[in-house]
Amino acid sequence: MNMIDFMEKFDTEEKCREYLYNMRWPAGYICPKCGVKDEPFQIISRNLYQCRHCTHQASVTAGTIMDGTRTPLLKWFVAMYLMGSDKGGCSALRLKRELSIAYDTAWTMSHKIRKAMGERDGLYLLEGTVEMDEAFFGSPDEGGKRGRGSGKTPVVVGLSLGEKGEPVYCKAQVLESVDGESIKAFAKQAVQPGATILTDGLNIYRPLGESGYAHQPKKTDPEKESENLKWLHIIVSNMKAFFAGTYHGLNSQHLQAFLAEFCFRFNRRFRQEQLFARTLCACVNASPFPRAKLVMS
């Protein structure tokens, strides 16, 4: 839906709450504590639902990333719409302006939504033919070299290809170290066993062939243009342009969250009309993520 349709559908707090209620309990209210399905008592003054059997009280946001929020649902919905539908992303500064909230609140909301995006994509594995390569993000140390050993943050990126060789789904993971064990751990977490993995000729990818994957390395001359891993390199370039254009560079501490945001939208790029609903679904099903934990992560 476009912005006009969105604002017409969710122009009041009550409409947002009703939509969220129906998303969480489409077949009727189920008590989060005792699991009994029954029509709850409604405590309208506090926007709570009380179980008729165990008297447990819950809100529509309980158990989601919005758990305990004081920010109106309408503003959460707009934040999800902007972050889910705009391929250029939405910075905390923009959320602050659009929602008329404090910057600290906007920053927290945006990171919670990214956390939910990452959890959602973690449910799926890349399969078939997968391109894999490492990339380096951030600014190099002053006077340092480029690439490996530059002080930049290393990231491994996997991209599954369709039957015609077109890009389908993408995953990315920050690496603590660029070595075979880290690559193998990423593959185990992100790639379906038995998949064909295409890489360059670096030795760090050698363990893939020993881990149940059909590894096909290909040595390339870094001084020359190559068709090897073509689509993956394009995706990495788009990632870097996205980070530089919207966020003007990133702190390595939260780089994983922004990678999750990019991949979430990329993986749903052909379902533009569903992006808000899918973003909201991710936020509803994600585990609560308190701000204190976010600041420490």
Image: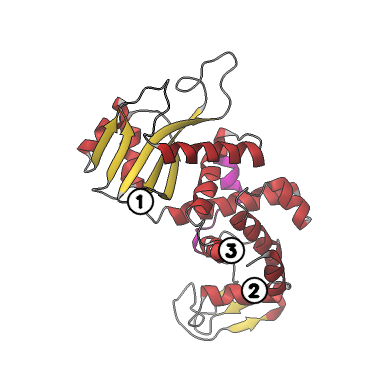
Sequence-wise, the earlier of marks 2 and 1 is 2
Mark 2 vs mark 3: in front: 3
User: Is residue 73 or residue 294 the one in the foreground?
Assistant: 73
Give the alpha-carbon distance from disc 2 to disc 1, as whole Å: 43 Å
Identify residue for label 2.
17
Residue pictured at 51% horizontal, 62% vertical: 271
Identify residue for label 3.
276
Residue pictured at 65% horizontal, 56% vertical: 82
Residue 162 rendering spot, x and y as whole percentages:
36, 52
The local crowd at label 1, few if under 14, some if 14 to 19, many if 20 or more residues have their Cα within 10 Å, is few
Residue 288 rendering spot, x and y as whole percentages:
54, 57
* Residue 290 is a magenta residue: yes
The local crowd at label 2, few if under 14, some if 14 to 19, many if 20 or more residues have their Cα within 10 Å, is some
Give the alpha-carbon distance from disc 1 to disc 3, as whole Å: 29 Å
Dots 2, 1 in contact, CB < 8 A = no
Q: Amino acid at mark 2?
A: Arg
Q: Quadrant location of residue 80?
A: bottom right
Identify residue for label 1.
164
Q: Amino acid at mark 1?
A: Lys
Is disc 3 placed on a helix, strand or loop? Answer: helix
Mark 2 vs mark 1: in front: 1
The residue stretch that appears in magenta: 285-297
Is disc 1 placed on a helix, strand or loop? Answer: loop
Q: Amino acid at mark 3?
A: Phe
Q: Which residue of the protein is positioned furthest toward the top in this rendering?
A: 143
User: Is residue 174 or residue 85 the one in the foreground?
Assistant: 85
Q: Which corner quadrant holds the N terminus?
A: bottom right
